[in-house]
Amino acid sequence: MAISDQNLDVTDLEIDLSPTRLPDNFWMQEYLRQSQQRLEAITEMSDRGETIDRGSHDWMLNQVDFIVESLGSDAGELNESLRSNLLQLILAIANLNQQLRGKIRAPSEQS
């Protein structure tokens, strides 16, 4: 059963990165909080055996792009704690993506 993004209680936080500086620590902390909530909701759906919709997959890929850009930017400075939290988030997304890929592969291997 596919679940659409509208059923999630978490909304996306859209942050516009200017080319000259990253959002200040408050915005980045809020981004992390909301992203972790969204990722937890997607993980719970997966754990219940529900199909993760394309919008959720796209959201995960967009977060990876944002995090890589944030960590690689020389224009803004993130404190060590925020950098660590961003790395943890990207690892959590990668782990969930791997789990989802494993669930897709598992049924076809059983036949």
Image (tube, rainbow, N blue to C red):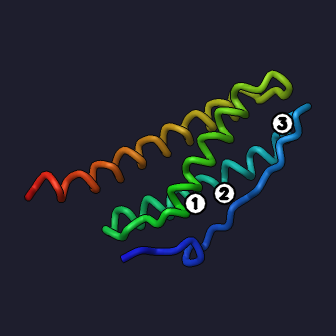
Q: Position of residue 60 (x, y in %)?
A: 55, 51
| SS at circle 3 | loop
Q: N-terminal of the two: label 2 or label 3?
A: 3
Asked if 75 appears above or below 16 in the picture, the reply is above
Question: Which quadrant would residue 88 be assigned to in this image?
Answer: top right
Q: State which mark lies toward you, 2 or 3.
A: 3
In the picture, the quarter occupied by the C terminus is: bottom left
Q: Amino acid at mark 2?
A: Gln
Badge 1 vs badge 2, beta-carbon distance below 8 Å: yes
Q: CA distance from mark 1 to mark 3?
A: 22 Å
Secondary structure category for the residue under label 2: helix
Res. 69 image quadrant: top right
Name the residue located 46 percent from the left edge and 74 percent from the top edge. 3
- Residue 17 lies, in percent from the top left, at 83, 42
Residue matched to label 3: 22
Measured as percent of width and height from the top left, residue 94 is found at 46, 41
Q: Residue at x 76, y 56 (%)?
A: 14
Q: Give the position of the N terminus as an image quadrant.
A: bottom left
Between 90 and 20, the residue placed more toward the observer is 20
Residue underneath mark 2: 34
Identify the image quadrant of residue 77: top right
x 76%, y 28%: residue: 79
